[in-house]
Image (tube, rainbow, N blue to C red):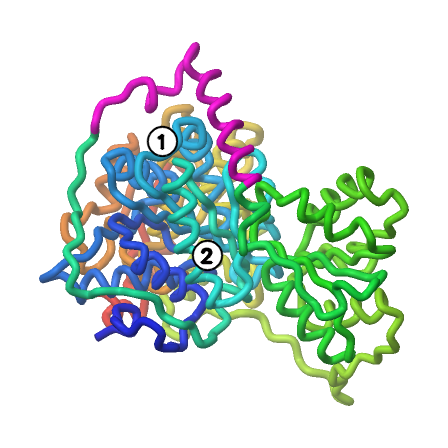
Amino acid sequence: MNKLLENAAGKQTMFLGNEAIIRGALESGVQYIATYPGTPASEIGNNFYALQKELKDDPKFYFEFSTNEKTAMESAIGANFSGLKTLVAMKNFGLNVALEPLLPLAYTGTRAPMVIFIADDPQCHSSAQSEENTRPFSVLGHIPMLEPSDAQECKDFTAEAFNISEKFGTPVIVRITTRTAHQRALVTLGELDPNRKIQLKGEFVKNKRKYVTMMPRLHGMKQELLDREQELQEYFEKSKLNRMEGRSMFKNQPLGIITSGVAYLHAREAMEQLGIDLPVLKLGTFHPLPEKKIRDFIKKLKKVLVLEELEPYLERRVQMLAKDVNCRLEIHGVDFRSQIGEMKPETALAAIAKFAGKNYKSSKFEPNFKVPMRSPQLCPGCPYWLAFAAVKKAVDEKEVIFGGDIGCYMIGALPPHEIYDYMFCMGSGIGIAHGIKKATNQKVIAFIGDGTFFHSGIEGLLNAVYNKSNPLLIILNNEITAMTGHQPHPDAVGVENRIPIENMVLACGVTPENMKIIDQGNAEEFIGAVKEFVEKPEVSVIIARRPCKFVENKIG
């Protein structure tokens, strides 16, 4: 049996942070899960997908890979309004896509418990767009947000998030970062009966007052939302998710640390290395913040260090609260650390040493030789090698603008290809290409993967056809969502009810004579098609189809 399904309360099992999230959801009796794959959240969907296959004769939950994060959110909302306990999972940029249905959900509230899992990626280990920090979205949406620090807390906070959601009738966000998602540690299991019967069918009970977000009822909904938020703040003041610790807390210690997430672990490790034990306020809830607890912590301190990743959101709130109780408090944060890149152990160590007046010399190994830099590479045998080579042979790179998108083929921006002139976010390649074509007479070729096309490329293609521009769109169809771990999509190998990409392209209004399906291995045909299609006066599409080298081993 899969270790995620073990019925062994009290047993310690080694889990990734993401696996612990799943275990917490299973222990809470989750019934409906929807996600779109995005690293560092990918393991959530991958494991639920595997569990669903394992439990096909006795299903314990419904799981789906949705076509994008917005549809995942909407799917989960529909199930939740039908009375099912739901979980939605995505990476930070996915929240941007899902915000449109999420913000009204905060107004209506939930019918059953609902948790939204968000994985941020400081340092951009698996992201290309930006070091997006999703914490302010909880404030924007008036949605409670929990921040676990380690794998045990990932499980426990997920269970608590379901409890909070049930108690207050609100969606709850559990937000972690890469190092929490991908750390591996022993986790003490809770109760999970693999033989229990889970009700997978609910019933939507009509309630227009609750579910229809229209004026004049809308203002009443917002007042209810603000009232819930106030109740949540009072609840979080007493919650064990926020705690003060440190032996010197009551010894008139003038220094203290406020921290959250993985920065808390770095702070504890740094103090151990420095041989000090400063009072620490460990915050497990980012919103609503337990303001009274923060005031109580800082009122007798002379100096406080706020340790957090990226932008100083906690630090700014502490500065505001200090004005009420300790206007002489010296507050440090970004002056002792960078706002760029993830929090690292050595970063925390240097910051705390400086804060506490301790001598600290970096033990970082400095080699006496130069390590050659290596760029990420496409896998050996990847069909994208053939695609980039053919396009470069077909056109003069100085005469054509090349647009990229999000997927394995992002690597086309790096040596030896260095083909892209712009690259932004999921599905934007064709949308920006259309704008360039409307604003200039230049030739534009946009690349997009098959998974990304279904995620958000269809709308851009439809817009380009409707508004009569003529970029060439090359859909790199390797028949799987490869970059995030070989998850299925509507035109993936082995998927039931398969929806061919070419049908979608034609449905968007591209004419049959302006669409061609080619195997990248046929270089002569590929080169000829690019030369022909880049000159067409209408939108044209080349579907470059050849499976990912590893697809046979992943989907069947």
Query: Residue 305 bears which disc, if any?
Result: none
Give the spatial CA distance, label 1 vs label 2. 42 Å
Q: Secondary structure at mark 2?
A: helix
Q: Amino acid at mark 2?
A: Phe
Task: Please identify the residue farthest to the front as the structure is shown.
Answer: 250
> Mark 1 vs mark 2: which is more N-terminal?
2
Residue 287 position, x and y percent, is: 57, 43
Which tag is nearer the camera, tag 1 or tag 2?
Answer: 2
Is residue 326 in view?
yes
- Identified at 38% across, 48% down, the residue is 162
Is residue 532 in view?
no
Q: Foreground: 439 or 116?
A: 116
Q: Are the two marked residues, 1 and 2, in contact with CB atoms closer than 8 angstroms? A: no
- Identified at 73% across, 74% down, the residue is 271
- Give the residue at mark 1: 462
Q: Is residue 210 magenta?
A: yes
Residue 35 position, x and y percent, is: 34, 50
Picture quadrant of residue 413: bottom right
Q: Classify the position of the C terminus by image quarter.
A: bottom left
Magenta stretch secondary structure, dominant: helix
Picture quadrant of residue 275: bottom right
Q: Foreground: 530 or 285?
A: 285
Q: Is residue 390 magenta?
A: no
Task: Please identify the residue farthest to the bottom as the structure is shown.
Answer: 368
Q: Secondary structure at mark 1?
A: helix
Crowding at mark 2 (Cα within 10 Å: few <14, some 14-19, many 20+): many
Q: Is residue 361 left or right of residue 98?
A: right
Start-end of magenta stretch? 205-234
Q: Is residue 486 left or right of residue 430?
A: left
Residue 249 position, x and y percent, is: 75, 64
- Give the residue at mark 2: 157
Q: Is residue 384 above or below residue 313?
A: below
